[in-house]
Amino acid sequence: MLNENIKAIRKSKGLSQEELAIKLNVVRQTISKWEQGVSVPDADMLISISEVFEMPVSTLLGETIVEAKVDDLKAISEKLEVINLRLARRKAAKQKAVHWLFISLCAVIAAVFAVLIVLNSPYLGWDYSNPETAVAGVVFHAFEWLFVRIAPFVLLGAVAGICLTRKDATSGL
């Protein structure tokens, strides 16, 4: 059991018998004898082996370590490929949604500007002696004043967002 574990762990770590021998300050033949079950390492050497393999001695002495099979690695690789493809599609969909959000924002800003131009600030001609009309007029005026000053910057940001997300959003998967 120990011989099989040493061999399996060495291979899983990508070490040759020669490389393991160098790390343990022994000759390659010693490693070969351990793996064939001809001899066993002493207690101090078991500790050194566990340090090289970065695992407890009990693991070396315990259950047989099963090497990863090529089919298992292939299955894992295929699953990772599917996951990566899904993540890439999800990312592309989010980028496309953000791209269309910027386009929608530009359209809304243009539509509100068009409505404000067509209405030509009708609240300016209202009778402000009536408190309800005065409050409504002030609210409309405040909205128009803020919109006209803030919207151009938002529009520029949205146009920049469209340009920045265009390539990724239109490439698709």
Image (cartoon, rainbow, N blue to C red):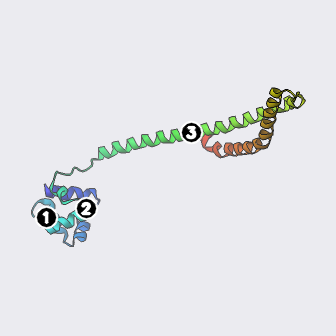
| Residues at marks 3 and 1 touching, judged by CB atoms closer than 8 Å | no
Going from N to C along the chain, the mark reached first, 1 or 2, is 1
Secondary structure of the residue carrying numbered label 1: helix
Q: Residue at x 24, y 51 (%)?
A: 67
Mark 2 closeness class: few <14, some 14–19, many ≥20 residues within 10 Å: some
Measured from the top left, where is residue 21 in percent x and y?
Answer: 22, 69
Q: Is residue 74 above or below residue 46?
A: above
N-terminal-most mark, 3 or 1: 1
Q: Quadrant of residue 101?
A: top right
Relative horizontal placement of residue 169, taking residue 67 as reference (left or right): right
Residue furthest out toward the right: 125
Judge by depth and name the residue closer to the eye, 5 or 55.
55
Q: Given the image, on which type of amino acid does mark 2 rest?
A: Phe
Q: Based on the displayed image, in which of its 4 quarters is residue 157 positioned?
A: top right
Residue drawn 30% across and 44% down? 72
Question: Mark 3 — residue?
Answer: 94
Label 2 residue SS: helix
The percent coordinates of residue 90 (x first, y second) are 51, 38
- Occupied quadrant, residue 116: top right
CA separation in Å, label 3 and label 1 = 59 Å
Q: Could you classify mark 1 by the number of other residues whose Cα lies within 10 Å: few (under 14), some (14-19), or many (20 or more)? A: some
Residue at which label 2 appears: 53
**Residue closest to the eye, 143 or 109:** 143
Compared with 18, 65 (above or below) is: above
The residue carrying pointer 3 sits among few (fewer than 14), some (14 to 19) or many (20 or more) residues within 10 Å by Cα, namely few
Residue 33's tag is 1
Q: Nearer the viewer, mark 1 or mark 2?
A: 2
Element under disc 3: helix
For the question of whether residue 145 can be seen, the reply is yes
Which residue lies at the image location 21% right of the left edge and 62% below the top edge?
Answer: 50
